[in-house]
Image: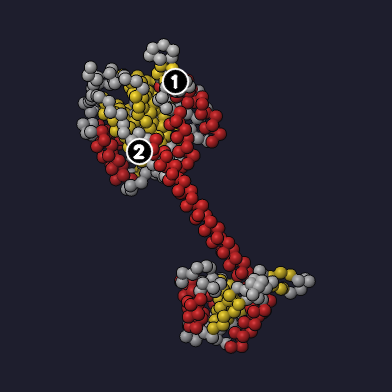
C-alpha cells in the first residue's frame, strides 16, 4: 500500500494523489450507497478504508483499532448513535495520536456546522459530496496528521534531551555542593553555622570559611547573577580562584622569601584583583556577582571586610542590639572603578555575632510582599542567645511560613559567626 502524501496538480486540471502507503480511515455512514461511494473515492486516493454502517458500529471498531485509525469521516444523522455523540466519544478518548474528524451531512446551516465543530470535528463536508472537495479536505487532514506526528517525534527527542540535561544538571549540582564546606572550621573561641538553599539543581551562591594562619580566618560569600548552569560554573570558577592555599599567583596569600614566608592580602585588595581578572569575561557573558570577603583575627577580635554590592551584613552585639553594616562598593563585573570598594574595620567584643546572607533570603516573597532585611535583623535581635545553627534553622522556617511554600525562588545562603573571646594560651 502506497502512502498518501497530499494533493498535487497534474497538467493544470484536477488533483492527483500519490499512493505510496495508505492512511487508515474509518467511515461512519448509515446510507449504504453513500458509504460505498465514499469508500471507492478514498481507496482511489490510496487510503485504507474501514466502513461502518452506523455510529455504534463505528465506535466499537474505533475502540478496537484506534492505534491504527488516523481519520474518521462521520455522518451526522445515524440511528442509535448520531455523529455528534460519536465525535464527542472519540475526542474524550485518550488516543496514541491525533485523530482527524470530518463531518459529512446534508445539514449545511451555520448553526449545524458550529455544533459539529464544537463537538470536536476538524472539518465539514455537505452531502452530496464533491469528489474534488473530498480530496482537498482529506489532503488537509493528512497534512495536520503528519505535522502532529512530526511534532510528537520532536517532543520525544526533546524529552530525551531534557533527561540528559537533567542528569547533567544533577551532576553539576553534586559537584557544586561538594565545594561547600561540609564541616566548618573547629576553632577555639569561634562558633560557625551556615545554610545553603539552591533554587534549582545548580545555583550562583557559594561560600567558604577557612584558616589563613593560626591567628586569622578568611570567609566569603558571593552571589552570581542569574540562575542555572552558567551562574554555577562561574561560582565554581570563583571558588577555585579563591583557594587559600599558598600559591605563586594566589589571591588570598602571597609567598615571601623571608619569614613568615607569606603575606595575607587585605579584603579590598582581593576584590580589586577579582575585578581585574573577571571584568572582561563578565561583561561578555552579561553576568556580575556580589560578594563579601572578610578576615577575622581570632585572638584580637579584629574583623576587616569589603562588600561589593552584596546585602548588608549584620552585627549582633552580646546584649542583643543589632546593627546593619552599611558602606561598601558596587558588584564586580559592572565595569565601575575598583576604587569605589572600601574596606571596613570592626573590633568584636566577646559574645558578638556577625551574619552574612544573600538576597535570596531577604527577597523571599509572600502575600505581604518581600521578607526584607528588617525582618531578618529583627529575627536575630530576638534570637541572639540561641545557638547559631538552631537560629539559622528557625529563620528558614520563618521565611518559608512567610512565603507560604518550602521552595525558594532564588538561591539563598547564610553564614553566621559568634566570637566568645581570645584563644587561651
Color scheme of the displayed model: secondary structure
Image coordinates for residue 48, horizontal then vertical, percent: 60, 77
Q: Which residue is mark 2?
A: 196
Measured along the vertical axis of the image, is residue 334 above or below residue 156? above
In whole angstroms, how far apart are the C-alphas of marks 1 and 2?
27 Å
- At horizontal 40% and vertical 42% (from top left) the residue drawn is 174
Image coordinates for residue 272, horizontal then vertical, percent: 47, 22
Residue lying furthest top? 258
Figure quadrant of residue 365:
top left
**Quarter holding the C terminus?**
top left
Secondary structure at badge 1 equals: helix
Q: Nearer the viewer, residue 132 or 219?
A: 219
Q: Residues within 10 Å of mark 2 (few under 14, many from 20)?
A: some
Any mark on residue 181, and which?
Answer: none
- At horizontal 53% and vertical 75% (from top left) the residue drawn is 116
Image coordinates for residue 20, horizontal then vertical, percent: 66, 71
Amino acid at each position: 500500500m502506497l502512502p498518501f502524501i497530499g494533493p498535487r496538480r497534474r497538467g493544470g486540471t484536477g488533483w492527483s494523489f500519490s499512493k505510496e502507503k495508505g492512511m487508515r480511515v474509518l467511515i461512519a455512514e448509515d446510507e449504504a450507497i453513500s458509504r460505498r461511494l465514499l469508500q471507492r473515492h478514498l481507496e482511489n486516493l490510496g487510503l485504507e478504508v474501514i466502513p461502518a454502517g452506523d455510529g455504534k458500529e463505528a465506535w466499537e471498531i474505533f475502540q478496537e483499532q484506534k492505534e491504527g485509525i488516523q481519520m474518521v469521516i462521520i455522518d451526522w444523522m445515524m440511528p442509535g448513535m448520531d455523529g455528534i455523540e460519536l465525535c464527542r466519544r472519540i475526542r474524550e478518548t485518550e488516543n496514541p495520536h491525533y485523530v482527524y474528524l470530518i463531518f459529512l451531512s446534508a445539514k449545511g446551516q451555520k448553526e449545524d456546522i458550529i455544533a459539529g465543530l464544537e463537538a470536536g470535528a476538524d472539518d465539514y463536508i455537505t452531502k452530496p459530496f464533491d469528489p474534488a472537495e473530498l480530496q482537498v479536505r482529506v489532503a488537509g487532514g493528512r497534512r495536520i496528521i503528519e505535522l502532529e506526528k512530526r511534532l510528537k517525534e520532536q517532543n520525544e527527542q526533546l524529552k530525551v534531551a531534557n533527561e540528559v540535561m537533567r542528569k547533567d544538571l544533577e551532576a553539576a549540582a553534586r559537584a557544586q555542593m561538594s565545594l561547600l564546606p561540609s564541616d566548618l572550621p573547629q576553632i577555639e573561641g569561634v562558633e560557625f553555622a551556615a545554610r545553603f538553599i539552591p533554587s534549582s539543581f545548580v545555583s550562583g551562591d557559594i561560600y567558604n570559611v577557612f584558616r589563613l594562619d593560626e591567628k586569622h580566618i578568611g570567609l566569603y560569600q558571593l552571589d552570581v547573577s542569574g540562575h542555572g548552569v552558567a551562574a554555577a560554573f562561574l561560582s565554581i570558577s570563583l571558588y577555585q580562584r579563591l583557594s587559600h592555599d599558598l600559591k605563586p599567583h594566589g589571591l588570598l596569600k602571597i609567598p615571601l622569601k623571608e619569614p613568615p614566608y607569606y603575606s595575607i592580602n587585605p579584603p579590598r585588595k582581593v576584590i580589586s584583583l577579582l575585578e581585574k581578572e573577571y571584568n572582561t569575561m563578565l561583561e561578555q557573558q552579561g553576568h556580575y556577582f556580589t560578594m563579601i570577603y572578610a578576615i577575622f583575627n581570632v585572638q584580637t577580635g579584629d574583623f576587616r571586610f569589603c562588600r561589593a554590592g552584596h546585602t548588608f551584613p549584620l552585627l549582633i552585639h552580646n546584649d542583643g542590639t543589632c546593627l546593619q553594616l552599611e558602606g561598601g562598593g558596587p558588584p564586580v563585573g559592572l565595569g565601575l572603578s575598583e576604587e569605589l570598594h572600601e574596606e571596613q574595620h570592626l573590633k568584636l567584643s566577646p559574645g558578638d555575632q556577625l551574619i552574612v546572607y544573600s538576597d535570596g533570603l531577604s527577597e523571599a516573597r509572600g502575600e505581604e510582599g518581600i521578607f526584607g532585611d528588617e525582618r531578618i535583623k529583627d529575627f536575630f535581635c530576638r534570637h541572639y542567645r540561641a545557638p547559631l545553627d538552631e537560629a539559622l534553622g528557625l529563620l528558614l522556617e520563618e521565611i518559608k511560613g512567610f512565603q507560604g511554600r518550602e521552595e525558594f525562588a532564588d538561591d539563598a545562603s547564610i553564614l553566621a559567626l559568634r566570637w566568645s573571646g581570645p584563644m587561651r594560651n
